[in-house]
Image (cartoon, coloured by chain):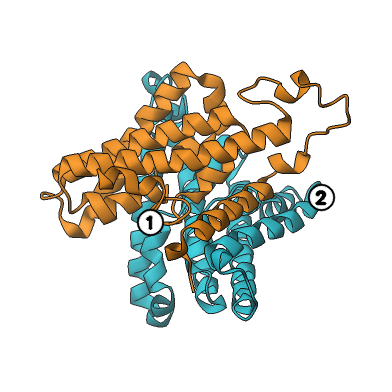
Amino acid sequence: MEYLNIFIKSIFIDNMIFAFFLGMCSYLAVSKTVKTSAGLGIAVTFVLLITVPVNYLLNKYVLQAGALAWIGESFATVDLSFLSLIMFIAVIAAIVQIVEMVVEKFSPSLYNSLGIFLPLIAVNCAVMGGSLFMQQRDYANIGEVISFSLGSGIGWFLAIVGIAAIREKLRYSHIPPALKGVGITFIITGLMGLAFMSFMGIKL
Amino acid sequence: MKIFTDPLAKNNPITVQVLGICSCLAVTAQLKPALVMAISVTVVVALSNLIISLMRNTIPPRIRIIVQLVVVSALVILVNQVLMAFVYDVSKQLSVYVGLIITNCIVMGRLEAFAMSRKPLESFLDGVGNGLGYGIILVIIGAFREIFGSGSIWGYPIMEKLGLYQIGYENNGLVIMAPMALILVGIIIWIQRTKDKDLQEN
């Protein structure tokens, strides 16, 4: 039940885009058509689902204060948490590179549809943000972390597909010329955020 | 000189290049964290531009992203430690967004677009300019949201001192919420593009 609660919470209430504005750059740049934005959304979900649990293990067994106690008594006082930023980004960049190579080898069709987005994801704030929130919120076990990362990914996917669908329709409406493009996208994202706020307070 | 002044308005990183939006929106509910964030980003962009520009001829193109990330994250760790040491309360408020300067698109974008191909001094100026351009928008939004959302400025309760509450004025709770920040940026872009017709999109 706890897993489901975290899952729903990270999709709707703590939505990466509407509540924390993470991954806005690619969200604004790639949301011109539904097809490409769905591809990016799936890629981000996939990468989040792999990197956040890996970083959780890294944080728990290497970086946290006293995390190195499993090596021996003398390591029990070591606190490497100041290194977490550089370790997380290194893990993310490496995993994105590996995912890219594996996907290219085993599923060329998926690679062709995701290919151009994968390198971009290494510097997507949503992925890094997922790891940092995981560290900050102190999840109890790996199951909770997995449901959090899957939920955040799906939330991001829903947001980018939603805005892409709206932008496709917007092309035929009369918008003041100065507001066209980025301006109106910001305002609509704000309005979608207001709508998502109605999920606040839901608890399973 | 043009390198330095362009990013302040005509080529502003937020409203024109549309980079670094995440942190811009998340930290601007009050003026103080917005200003601290603006300074941190300026420091990181300027120094990483300078360092990468000094190293640009020795970086192999295939692994440049990793090299850039390492330089940027080292700088961000420094900034993070300094913030935690001197302004602990603000650093708590900024929470993960200090760490997210690493993946802030302004930093990576300027490194890729500018520092990889220019001389160190130019790159440094470009970094400072972009950091300040980002800072201006952050301070505008932060000031607006603090005045209308919590009725104070820099923690000073300006609305109460003016006596506006007695005549029925109320703080607008919506302004401190997340969606309002997005709408504000949209409006700033609208105003800027109305004035400067070159920037309009078709």
Query: The numbered mark 2 sits on a residue in which chain?
Result: A
- The reply, left or right, for residue B73 in relation to residue A56 is left
* Residue B117 % position (x, y): 18, 54
Q: Which image quadrant for residue A161? A: bottom right
- Which is more toward the observer, A127 or A32? A32
- Are discs 1 and 2 both within one chain? yes
Image: B174 above or below A80: below
- The reply, left or right, for residue A134 in relation to residue A118 is right
* Residue A195 % position (x, y): 76, 58
User: What residue is drawn where x is 47% and y is 48%?
Assistant: A128
Q: In this rendering, does residue A58 appear at all?
A: no
Q: Residue A202 carries which label?
A: 2
* Residue A137 % position (x, y): 61, 37
Q: How far apart are marks 1 and 2 (CA)?
A: 34 Å
User: What residue is drawn where x is 56% and y is 35%?
Assistant: A136
Type of amino acid at the residue the image marks with label 1: Ile
- The reply, left or right, for residue A106 in relation to residue A140 is left
Q: Which mark is residue A95?
A: 1
Image: B148 above or below A119: above
Query: The numbered mark 1 sits on a residue in which chain?
Result: A
Q: Which residue occupies the extreme left position in the image?
A: B57
Q: Which of marks 1 and 2 is nearer the N terminus?
A: 1
Answer few, some or many: residues within 10 Å of disc 2's Cα (few below 14, many 20 plus, some between 14 and 19).
few
Chain B is which colour?
orange
Image: A67 above or below B200: above
